[in-house]
Image: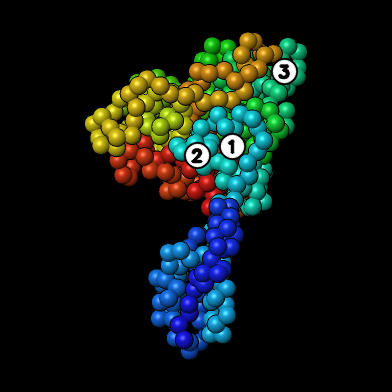
Amino acid sequence: MPIRLLLPAVLAFMLLAAPAAARAGGYVPGEVIVKYRNGAPGAERLIDVGTARSLPGGSEQVAVREGATVREALTELRRDPDVAYAVPNYRAHASAAVPNDPGLRRQWNFVGPFGIGMPEAWQLAIDRGAPGGRGVVVAVLDSGVAYENRGRYRRAPDLRGTRFARGHDFVGRDPYPNDVFGHGTHVAGTIAQTTNNGIDMAGIAYGARIMPVRVLDAEGSGDSAAISRAVRWAVRHGADVINLSLEFPSEVRAAEIPDVISALRYARKKNVVVVAAAGNQADVTVAYPARASSVIAVGATTDSGCEAEYSNAGGDLDLVAPGGGVDAPNADNPWDAAHCRLDGRGRSILQQTFTFGVRSFGLPRGYEGTSMAAPHVAATAALVLATKRLGPAATPSLVEAHLESTATDAGPPGFDDRYGNGIVNAAAALR
C-alpha cells in the first residue's frame, strides 16, 4: 500500500513547528532520508512522498512534495513496518572556535571571503590537540618585538599572553631584541597575537612561541651579514619556522648575498621552514631572500582577493596571502578584469603595534605589504607542523607542497606569475 502524506488536519500545526528547526540550520527543509528493510519494494513506494534519489548503502534521499513538512513525512514513514529508518537530511557545519577579541571583525584577512580560513582553522587545530599551533617555535627576524618590560620598553598589551622563546639582537649585539620600529611587533602579532583575551586583535598561531630576532634597525634596514648570522642562530636555537618580512632590492642577485643563501640552505637542511616576503616594488621578479629555492616566497593580495598593486610577481612566487592595500590594475586577463577594483580603495592589515613611541600601542592603519602577507603563511605552516597534519617529521618541502596544494586558487586557473599557487588557506591545510 503506498504511503500517503499531508493529512489536512495535521498540516496547520506542522507548518508552525517544522520550519523553526530548519531555520536553525538543523536539517535540509523538504528532504528526508529513508531506508527500507531487506526485500521491501524500495524507491517506488516513495512516489507519493516525492522525488527519490538512491544513496550508497541502499537508502533514499527523498525530496518531500510541495506543501509537505519534514516532521510529518517522518511520522508517516516510520509507521510503515517495512521502513528500517527515516531521518531528516541533517546539516553539518564546519566547527569554528570564534575568539572574543573585539577587533576580529575587522580582520578581513582572517574571516573575510578572501581571508585565510580562520576561525575554522583554529577549531581544527584544537581538535587535533594543538590549539593555536602549541609546541611550535616561530622565529621572527625583523625589527625586534615588543616582548618585555625592560627599561624604556614595554610588552605590547595584546602580547601579554603570547609565549616567547629566547631571542637575540643582531643590530645592538645583545640578548634583548626589543622593537623600536614597530614592524616586527606587527608581524609577530599576525603570527601569534594573544587570542580570546578580549583585547584588540587575534593571531593565527596564537599558541606558538615567538622567537624575536632583531636584524633591522630603527629605520627598518638591515645588512646581509646580520641576516645570515640570525638565520643560523634561529636554527641552532630551536626555531621550527622562520619568517623573513624583509627584502633586498630586486636587482640584487644570489651571488651578491652568498652568506644569506648559504644560511637559508642550512635552515632547509635542518628541516626549518623559511617563509619570506616577495617584495614591494611591483616588479616582475621576486626579491631575495624569497627568491631562494629553499624559501616559500609570498606575494600580497587585497580584501578583494586580487594582487596588491605593490606586490612583486614572477615565476618564483609560491603563494600569496593578505597584505592589504589597493588592487593592481591588471586588465590583461578575464579573471582580474572581472574581480578587481580600480577605485583606489583598500584595507590595511590591522595588528597591535606602536602608535607614538615604544610605550604607546594601538592599531595603526597603513600596514600593508608583502611583509604583512608572509606571516600568514609562516603561521599556517606552524599550525600544520603543530597538528602533525603531515606526520611527526614533516620536511620543509612537504610543508610547502601541502600549503600550495591546499591554497585557494586566484587569478587564471592554476599557477600563474601574479598569484603563484593561490591564496594560503589555513582551514584547508588542516582539514
**Label 1 to label 2: alpha-carbon separation:** 10 Å
**Label 1 to label 3: alpha-carbon separation:** 23 Å
User: Could you tell me which residue is drawn at 66 percent across and 45 percent down?
Assistant: 131
Quick one: label 3, few (<14), some, or many (20+) residues within 10 Å? Answer: some
Task: Indicate which label's residue lies in the foreground, 1 or 3.
Answer: 1
Please say if the residues under marks 3 and 2 sit with CB atoms less than 8 Å apart.
no
Classify mark 3: helix, strand or loop.
loop
Query: Which residue was labeled with disc 1?
Result: 204
Quick one: label 2, few (<14), some, or many (20+) residues within 10 Å? Answer: many
At which x and y percent is residue 172? 64, 15
Q: Which mark is residue 116?
A: 2
Please say if the residues under marks 1 and 2 sit with CB atoms less than 8 Å apart.
yes
- Residue type at mark 1 is Ile
> Which of the two labelled residues, at mark 1 and mark 3, occupies the earlier sequence position?
3
Classify mark 1: helix, strand or loop.
loop
Q: Is residue 185 above or below residue 113?
A: above
User: Could you tell me which residue is drawn at 46 percent across and 28 percent down?
Assistant: 323
Query: Which residue was labeled with disc 3?
Result: 154
- Residue type at mark 2 is Ile
User: Could you tell me which residue is drawn at 64 percent across and 52 percent down?
Assistant: 127
Asked which quadrant contains residue 80, the reply is: bottom right
At which x and y percent is residue 91? 54, 58
